[in-house]
Each structure stands twice: as C-alpha cells, then as structure tokens.
Amino acid sequence: MAGLRLTNGRIDLRDGDRAFRLEVDVLALAPGETVALTGPSGSGKTLLLELLGLLRAPGRGTAYHSGENDLAALWEQGARSAALARGRGRLFGFVPQTGGLMPFLTVTENVALPQAICDRRDPDRVSDLIDRLGLTDVSRLRPGALSIGQRQRTAIARALSHRPPFIVADEPTAALDPDSADRVLDLLLEAARQDGTGVILSSHDIARMERFAIPRRALVVVTEGNSAVSRLKAPAC
Ligand SMILES: Nc1ncnc2c1ncn2[C@@H]1O[C@H](COP(=O)(O)OP(=O)(O)OP(=O)(O)O)[C@@H](O)[C@H]1O
C-alpha cells in the first residue's frame, strides 16, 4: 500500500485586496501513520485538508502522489470528472468540520453510504461503528434531529465505514465531550494500526494530541505585503 506525498503544495486565494497563500514544501503520510495539523484559526488547516482529500484543486506547481498514482492530475478533466470522484471515494474518508451528512438519510444509511458507493457492503461494520461511537439510540434518525456532536460522530463513522486507505478529518473532536473525543481518537488510531490507514486530522487540542502521542505539524502565518502566507513547518525531530 502506498502513502501520500504532497510537494510544492500551493493554494492562492484572493478577495479584492486580501490575499491568502498556502505553501507546503513537503507533506508525506505513510500507511498506518497518524499526523495532526495545528495552527491558529484561519491558518489554512481546512484548505490543506481539502487539498489532500481531493476536494480542492491544487494551485500551479503542486505535485501530489500516492505511489505511482498522480493525484494532482485527476483535476485535469475538471472538478466534476468521474476520475476525480472515483479517486476521492476510493482513497479517502473525509470528515468535514460541519458534518456534511446527507440530510434525507438516517444515521445508519449515512454510515453505510460509502460502502454502497465502493461496492463493499459490510452491515456488521456499520453497526459496530454506530455502537462504538454511541449512536445506537439515534441510528434511525436523520441528521436534522441530531445534536452537533452526534452529527460529528456520524461523519466519523461514515469516513471509517469503507476502510479507506486514508482518513482526512477536520477537527474531528471539536464538538465532542472528552470521553467521546477519546473514543474517536481510539478508533482513528485503531484504523491506523489494524488496517494501515493513513490518518491526517486537524486539531486545536494540543494536550489531547500529546496524550495520544500523535505527531504534530504546525501551520505558521506571516504577512508579506498584502498577503497572508501560511507555511507548514518542518516536522520536529
Ligand atoms: N477568497 C479569499 N481570499 C483571501 N483569503 C481567503 C479567501 N477565502 C478564505 N480566505 C482565508 O483563507 C484562510 C482559510 O483558512 P482555513 O479555513 O483553512 O483555516 P483553519 O486553519 O481551518 O481555521 P479554523 O481553525 O478556524 O477552522 C482564512 O485565513 C481565510 O480568511
């Protein structure tokens, strides 16, 4: 199984006079490795996770590979191409900051959806994830009837359900009580250990990342002229 390797990663955003640039010299994620992105609010963690999860087009010069597979090239046929959707679904389980659940499906149906898309149906895994994330009592409800934390846990179960090679999770513990946050990290680390899943997440909870021994990579923002430039610091030795 191959890992992920992003080199010379760039995203440029502009809004009138305001400009934001994300620069990542190298970010590699090996199979079974877990990494936490940290950095202040607005430093580009979500942008970088979207880039990694094939939800945001890379800027010019960006190289992004999984082994021999050129992931940056998947954007060449446009944002709606079948190749891009296939790559995204096959490689990634994505946990968006806001849940991103299908509003017309129940919790169980949302969690089972990636399995159906990848043709890897496994109802036992769906019920196991629902049970371990404390969602059994709400499994027949739709997202509109859930708390924010219940929605976040459903999104985590959905990302794990088809055992993707990589999980990209945007602040997956932000809306959770301490016990649920620990359970989520246990599950993500278990996927890394048992299935060789590469996990990259963002978090402001440095103490919890330290307690779970998750290595951190920080985004640091500097001002250059009219631009805010965010760079990923080299990993600590
Ligand atoms: N069109 C735009 N032009 C210029 N800057 C933009 C534009 N759109 C977004 N930005 C900036 O890009 C950055 C995006 O940050 P992002 O949401 O990735 O941060 P984050 O680290 O995930 O923050 P948080 O911890 O609050 O979730 C923000 O600083 C935002 O102000």
Image (cartoon, rainbow, N blue to C red):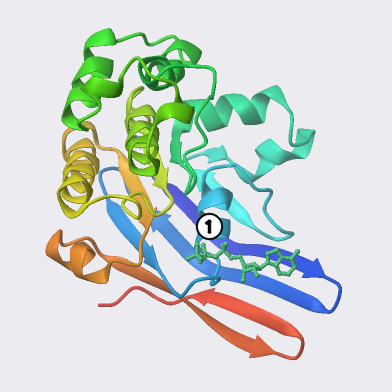
- Tell me if residue 2 can be seen: no
Q: Image check: 118 left or right of 70?
A: left
Indicate the position of residue 180 as horizontal and vertical percent values: 20, 45
Residue labelled with disc 1: 46
Q: Nearer the viewer, residue 3 or 79?
A: 79
Point 25% across, 65% down: residue: 215
Mark 1, secondary structure of its residue? helix
Q: Image check: 105 left or right of 135?
A: right
Point 25% across, 27% down: residue: 135
Point 46% across, 39% down: residue: 99
Quarter placement of the C terminus: bottom left
Q: Is mark 1 within 8 Å of ligand 1?
A: yes
Q: Amino acid at mark 1?
A: Thr
Indicate the position of residue 38 as horizontal and vertical percent values: 39, 69
* The image quadrant in which ligand 1 is located: bottom right
Indicate the position of residue 220 as horizontal and vertical percent values: 49, 80
Q: Nearer the viewer, residue 236 or 103?
A: 103
Where on the picture, by quarter, is residue 192? top left
Where on the picture, by quarter, is residue 12? bottom right
